[in-house]
Image: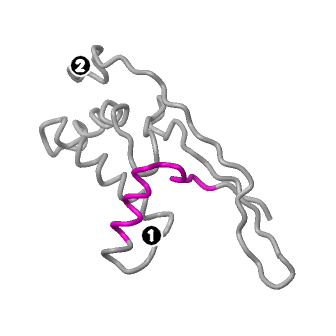
Amino acid sequence: MTGVFASPRGNLLASVFEQEYTARFGRSPSPYAYFTYDSVWLAALAILFSGKYDGEAVAKALPVVSEHFIGVTGYKTFNENGDAAGADYTIWQYTFDGTKYKFEDIRYLKKRPTPIDATKSCNGLAPLL
């Protein structure tokens, strides 16, 4: 069986997150812990950037904030539909070595960041510079 999972592998921030998480909770983080951590940071930064706790304002701020955010799961940008524009992925295979089954990484695909122009406004918000 082969699968794909968005992966924080190879990111220095992910290594620090893993160490801090393990020290605090006594176990390694699940794959979802990385994405939850980044999601909470993005939401908080969008609230701060918009200047108010309002869903519509936060929704407008999120794409701007995300273009300047590198989290434990890598770069975060959104497409015109508000979906994640890409991520780093690990392609894995579930294998049997003769005694036990295990997940084995086959390939790692890293998303390349898109250059941004912080002098332009976005979604009706003021430019960052």
* Residue occupying the far right of the picture: 98
**Viewer-proximal residue among 55 and 11:** 11
Q: Which residue is mark 1?
A: 29
Give the side of residue 123 with respect to residue 34, left or right. Answer: left
Q: Residue 17 magenta-drawn?
A: yes
In the rendered image, residue 129, in percent from the top left (x then y), is placed at 21, 18
- Examine the structure image and report whether residue 47 is included in the region drawn in magenta: no
Give the SS element for disc 1. loop
Q: Which mark is residue 93?
A: none
Crowding near the residue tagged with mark 2, few <14, some 14–19, many ≥20 C-alpha atoms within 10 Å: few
Q: Quadrant of residue 1?
A: bottom right
Left or right, 21 with respect to 75, comes to left
**Residue 22 placement: quadrant:** bottom left
The magenta-colored residue range is: 5-21
Q: Residues within 10 Å of mark 1 (few under 14, many from 20)?
A: some
Label 2 vs label 1: CA separation? 36 Å
Q: Which mark is residue 127?
A: 2
Q: Helix, strand or loop at disc 2?
A: loop
Residue 6 image offset from top left, x and y in percent: 57, 52
Residue at image coords 46%, 73%:
28
Q: Are marks 2 and 1 in contact (CB under 8 Å)?
A: no
